Image (cartoon, grey):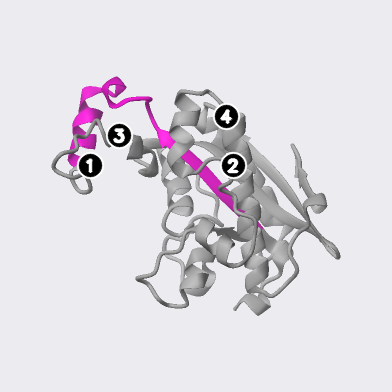
Amino acid sequence: MLDSIKIEDILFLDIETVPQMPSMNLLEPPAQALWDKKSKFFRSPEESAETVYDRAGIYAEFGKIICISVGYIKDKNPLSFRLKSFFGDDEKNILAEFSEMLLKFSKSKKDALLCAHNGKEFDFPYIARRMIINRQVIPEILDNAGKKPWEVKLLDTMDLWKFGDYKNYTSLNLLTTILGIPSPKDDIDGSMVAKVYYEENDLGRIVRYCEKDVLAIAQVLLRFKNLPGISEERIESVTEF
């Protein structure tokens, strides 16, 4: 499968999410009750809905997107990589700008694909659900409803690493480490994003972390295809693709 995929047709992406509010007691009472019901499925008896509220960001119904970072291979010889991020406090605006870019990328690439790590379980459905919540149209490349398997344009580096072993979970940090690729978790990790956002108000730090994840995903896929990696001097962050 990977042999037939052109690396320049792939848009790599990663998202960062946080709970909708800094703390559970700031939610409207109906939302608090719903979170209490939802969290009963995973919290231990000694934990309360409030003490596990920091996990709300991983659920599209209780969280929101604060950053979407994307990247693509611009040149092949030697390889160069372009990065762009959509971020801020206004989720609807983030999604609208991302959607506009996605439509342009899809039109410019006949066989465009999206690629994320654990994207099929997290990033892709999370973005689609938040688009529906924000009354936005899901771009065709992201919408896999009713499509046949060969029509789906979504790649997942974790899924590829499983080789059919569906009980296996491998984090991006573990995968980059065993493949000798620089880890994107050298500053913060996903569990720290909400604290950095709500308590430190350091969105720039989160964006840098998100972009590192996107680069790492691209490096992993290149390794899967047995291609050279992207050198640091060939990586460019841009405001426009």
**Position of residue 7 in the picture relative to residue 117 (left or right):** right
**Position of residue 138 in the picture relative to residue 38 (left or right):** right
Q: Quadrant of the N terminus?
A: bottom right
Q: Amino acid at mark 4?
A: Leu
Indicate whether 137 appears above or below 11: above
Q: Sequence-wise, which precedes: disc 4 or disc 1? A: 1
Residue that mark 1 sits on: 39
Q: Are marks 3 and 1 in contact (CB under 8 Å)?
A: yes
Q: Quadrant of the C terminus?
A: top right
Q: Sequence-wise, which precedes: disc 3 or disc 1? A: 1
Q: Are marks 4 and 1 in contact (CB under 8 Å)?
A: no
Q: Which is more toward the observer, 171 or 95? A: 171
Residue pictured at 45% horizontal, 25% vertical: 198
Residue pictured at 33% horizontal, 25% vertical: 23
Residue 152, percent from left and from top: 52, 66
Residue that mark 4 sits on: 203
Q: Sequence-wise, which precedes: disc 4 or disc 2? A: 4
Q: Which residues are magenta?
A: 11-37
Distance between mark 2 and mark 1 Cα atoms: 27 Å
Residue that mark 2 sits on: 209
| Outermost residue to the right | 77
Q: Amino acid at mark 2?
A: Tyr
| Mark 1 surroundings within 10 Å by alpha-carbon count, few (fewer than 14), some (14 through 19), many (20 or more) | some
Residue 59, percent from left and from top: 35, 43
Indicate whether 98 appears above or below 147: above
At mark 4, the secondary structure is: helix
Distance between mark 3 and mark 1 Cα atoms: 8 Å
Residue 64, percent from left and from top: 43, 35
Q: Sequence-wise, which precedes: disc 2 or disc 1? A: 1
Residue that mark 3 sits on: 53
